[in-house]
Amino acid sequence: MILTLCIFAFSGSNMMPSSFIKFEPITPTSITVVFDLARCPYISQGVAGFKVWHQVDGTGFYSLNPTGTVHLMSKSFVVTELKPATCYMIKVTAFSNSSEFA
């Protein structure tokens, strides 16, 4: 099986590729979302952390509540209980102490 991942950060209503988000390690039932802020130091200015959502690809919606919250100091989040051989979409948004960046 070949696993292809596309990663996007959201800036306003525009999506742009994000070189600071990586997936490692990947197992049949989990994936670790890693934030490599050294690759993109301007991102950490004003950012308190990130919210992570996941959905089965093609379902068309994310839950209202994030799968998890990653504070800037931890730099990673493990998404667990995934079904093997299933494609997932991962959504990441940044937030500051006062608001969420779309």
Image (spheres, grey):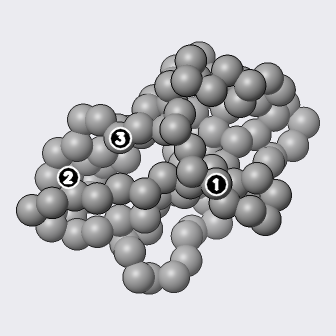
Q: Is residue 90 above or below residue 57?
A: above
Q: Residue at x 71, y 30 (%)?
A: 43
Report the quarter where the C terminus lies.
Answer: bottom right
Distance CA(mark 2)–CA(mark 3): 13 Å
Q: Is residue 40 above or below residue 38?
A: below
Pointer 2 local density, CA inside 10 Å: few below 14, some 14–19, many at least 20:
few
Pointer 1 local density, CA inside 10 Å: few below 14, some 14–19, many at least 20:
few
Residue 78 placement: quadrant = top left
For the view shown, which residue lies furthest in the bottom direction?
Answer: 59
Query: Is 81 situated left or right of 52 in this image?
Result: left
Distance CA(mark 1)–CA(mark 3): 17 Å
Residue 88, given in percent of the width and then of the height, sits at 35, 65
Distance CA(mark 1)–CA(mark 2): 27 Å
Amino acid of disc 3 = Phe
- CB atoms at circles 1 and 3 under 8 Å apart? no
- From the image, tell me which residue sits under label 1: 16
Mark earlier in primary sequence (2, 3): 3
Amino acid of disc 2 = Thr
Residue 31 placement: quadrant = top left
Q: Residue at x 51, y 82 (%)?
A: 60
Query: Is 20 situated left or right of 5 in this image?
Result: right
Give SS at disc 3. strand
- From the image, tell me which residue sits under label 3: 23
Residue 17, given in percent of the width and then of the height, sits at 57, 51
- From the image, tell me which residue sits under label 2: 29
Frontmost residue, 28 versus 44: 44
